Image: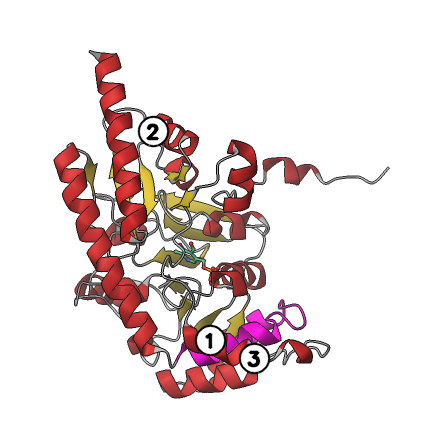
């Protein structure tokens, strides 16, 4: 019999929002609205589609392992050497590679207690430990993180804006933090929602790479570029030596040929990203106003999702919505059982969501009377 290592019993598995097809099968509904995975509801970058539509005939060949042309393009955009850039099948996978390359027995990494769960998953495959620092007012507590640094700390994972809360660390705070973090600790600065940020005080990762060699910036094509199904993201490293170290754990041909081509084209599709930003903003404002009307507490978000804190059991609300064919996310897996996270959808989806949510909240409040 094959022995399954006991350590796997303790592993947390990433449970994604249910795919639409699966939900359809489960519920037998034709209409399913999925607002659970922060995908782009406005489709795919048309330039990306154009770039790949006639390329299927070339997938008999392995892709370029280093995503050479995409890396070159990113190098031009960010004015950093292409050697400092690593492209992977999504930024979550790159976070895992970073942890598995750098963490040794007994090492520690820090992150927030209510944040993107991939950091935890990345660390559980290493012989190190993840220390979670509680958020302050639902935002990363950078002072609290600095206080948790020990001589064992190797990595700090930070999502800005944060998932699931949508909150943002501002420039001044980030700069002070970077000044105070010892340069022996790698700061993994995850900007998955960067294109949706409204706040002008947002610290743009690439602007700090020259100054801080202990910084790596993660970006993705899964959100504003509409390429979640392609699986492609990248990391910009302040120090080429760290990139080279991480590269050692990267499997061959990590990013498909089509994904590389789509990403290259999407980078030029400013119009699509602008449209996605604007429609997201419109949807967000609508949802804020409706949450206010319904008396539902929420946090202002710099992303394409909103974190809400209902007075009654959040899981119950999520379950009831699911039974009506609307999938949102209970945030228990993110360390926040008190809330739910809803992706901003198209206006039609947002309206449907609000309509069903209102009915559910009314039903809950009349049952509790
Ligand atoms: C903070 C954060 N980082 C990374 C990702 C994953 O991006 P990718 O699809 O590039 O793996 C997500 C996706 O939800 C996210 O919320």
**What's the CA distance linking mark 1 and mark 2?**
37 Å
Position of 358 relative to 145 (above/below): above
Q: In the image as oriented, which residue stretches furthest toward the right?
A: 1
Quarter containing the C terminus: top left
In the image, 278 versus 81, the foreground residue is 278
- The quadrant of the picture showing ligand 1 is bottom left
- Residue 28 shows in this picture: yes
Query: Callout 2 environment at 10 Å: few (<14), some (14 to 19), or many (20+)?
Result: many
| Residue holding disc 2 | 317
| Residue holding disc 3 | 67
In the image, 167 versus 176, the foreground residue is 167
- The earlier-in-sequence mark between 3 and 2 is 3
Label 1 SS: helix
Q: Quadrant of residue 197?
A: bottom left
- Residue 83 shows in this picture: no
- The earlier-in-sequence mark between 1 and 3 is 1
**What's the CA distance linking mark 3 and mark 2?**
43 Å
């Amino acid at each position: 019999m094959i022995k399954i290592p006991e350590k796997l019993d303790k592993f947390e598995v990433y449970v994604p929002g249910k795919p639409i097809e699966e939900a359809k099968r489960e519920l037998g509904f034709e209409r399913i609205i999925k607002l659970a995975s922060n995908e782009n509801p406005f489709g795919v970058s048309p330039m990306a589609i154009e770039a790949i539509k006639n390329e299927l005939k070339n997938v008999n060949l392995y892709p370029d392992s280093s995503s050479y042309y995409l890396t070159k393009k990113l190098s031009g955009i960010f004015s950093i050497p292409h050697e400092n850039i690593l492209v992977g099948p999504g930024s979550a996978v790159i976070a895992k590679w970073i942890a598995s390359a750098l963490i040794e027995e007994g090492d520690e990494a820090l992150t927030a207690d209510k944040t993107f769960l991939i950091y935890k998953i990345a660390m559980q495959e290493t012989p190190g430990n993840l220390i979670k620092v509680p958020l302050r007012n639902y935002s990363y507590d950078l002072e609290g993180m600095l206080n948790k640094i020990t001589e064992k700390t190797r990595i700090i994972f930070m999502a800005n804006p944060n998932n699931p809360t949508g909150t943002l660390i501002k420039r001044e705070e980030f700069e002070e933090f970077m000044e105070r973090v010892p340069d022996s600790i790698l700061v993994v600065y995850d900007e998955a929602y960067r294109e949706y940020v409204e706040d002008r005080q947002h610290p743009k990762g690439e602007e700090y790479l020259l100054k801080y060699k202990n910084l790596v910036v993660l970006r993705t094509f899964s959100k504003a570029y509409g390429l979640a199904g392609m699986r492609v993201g990248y990391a910009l490293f302040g120090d080429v030596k760290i990139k080279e170290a991480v590269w050692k754990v990267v499997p061959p041909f990590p990013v498909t040929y089509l994904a590389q081509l789509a990403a290259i084209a999407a980078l030029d599709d400013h119009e699509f990203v602008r449209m996605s930003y604007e429609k997201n903003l419109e949807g967000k404002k609508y949802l804020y106003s409706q949450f206010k009307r319904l008396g539902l507490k929420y946090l202002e978000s710099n992303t394409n999702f909103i974190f809400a804190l209902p007075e009654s059991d959040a899981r119950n609300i999520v379950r009831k919505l699911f039974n009506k064919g609307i999938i949102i996310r209970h945030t228990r897996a993110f360390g926040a059982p008190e809330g739910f996270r809803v992706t901003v959808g198209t206006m039609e989806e947002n309206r449907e969501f609000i309509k069903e949510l209102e009915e559910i909240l009314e039903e809950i409040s009349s049952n509790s009377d």
